[in-house]
């Protein structure tokens, strides 16, 4: 449980500071939708920077959530774990990178693909 300020913090022009707190907030209640199927994974690499996911960030991943076109997923492709945006195209499944420096991964007919879970939240350090 963490203390919660009563007022919002201005991101534009400053407002007078107020030292009033509403009480506490349980971050798990706000970030975790299903604790029995939710995990945190650390990202390594830069292929998802365009989606706001940076090297070293942690993703809250729900393994029970059904992936849909456009979901950011943690997938296992031919034995290698990766995080990419899932694209369901008429030509087949594509794991899309969110950086021009990395290629998209077209999932071939003989490839082994398992969607391990759907990323719900990115914890990004400043």
Image (cartoon, helix red, strand yellow):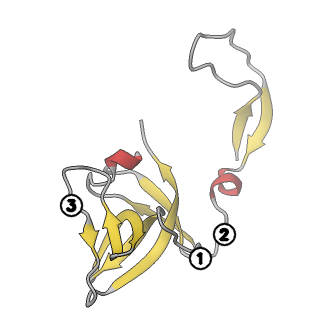
Q: Who comes first in sequence, dot 1 or dot 2?
A: 2
Mark 3 neighbour density, 10 Å: few (under 14) some (14–19) many (20 or more)? few
Gap in Å between the C-alphas at discs 1 and 2?
Answer: 8 Å
Res 58 quadrant in image: bottom left
- Furthest toward the right, the residue is 22
- Furthest toward the front, the residue is 90
Q: Are marks 1 and 2 in contact (CB under 8 Å)?
A: yes
- Where is residue 110? Give x, y as percent: 26, 90
Q: Classify 79 as above or below 126.
A: below
**Circle 2 is placed at which residue position?**
34
| Circle 1: element type | loop
Mark 1 neighbour density, 10 Å: few (under 14) some (14–19) many (20 or more)? few
**Circle 3 is placed at which residue position?**
103
- Where is residue 92? Give x, y as percent: 35, 77
- Residue under the image location 36 percent in, 63 percent down: 84
Nearest-to-viewer mark from 3 and 2 = 3
- Residue under the image location 77 percent in, 27 percent down: 6
- Residue under the image location 63 percent in, 55 percent down: 31
Q: Who comes first in sequence, dot 3 or dot 2?
A: 2
Q: Classify 113 as above or below 106.
A: below
| Circle 2: element type | loop
Q: Are marks 3 and 2 in contact (CB under 8 Å)?
A: no
The answer to whether residue 53 shows anywhere in this view is no
Nearest the camera: 17 or 10? 10
Labelled disc at residue 64: 1
Nearest-to-viewer mark from 1 and 2 = 1
- The quarter of the picture where the C terminus appears is top left
Gap in Å between the C-alphas at discs 3 and 2?
Answer: 33 Å
Nearest-to-viewer mark from 3 and 1 = 3
């Amino acid at each position: 449980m963490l203390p919660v300020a009563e007022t919002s913090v201005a991101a534009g022009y400053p407002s007078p500071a107020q030292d009033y707190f509403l009480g506490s907030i349980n971050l798990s209640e706000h970030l975790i939708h299903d604790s029995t199927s939710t995990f945190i994974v650390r990202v390594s690499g830069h292929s998802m920077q365009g989606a706001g996911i940076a090297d070293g960030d942690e993703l809250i991943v729900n393994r029970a959530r059904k992936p849909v076109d456009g979901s950011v997923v943690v997938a296992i492709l031919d034995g290698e774990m990766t995080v990419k945006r899932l694209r369901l195209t008429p030509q087949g499944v594509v794991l899309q990178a969110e950086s021009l420096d990395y290629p998209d991964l077209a999932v071939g007919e003989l490839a082994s693909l398992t969607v391990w879970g759907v990323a719900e939240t990115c914890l990004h350090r400043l």
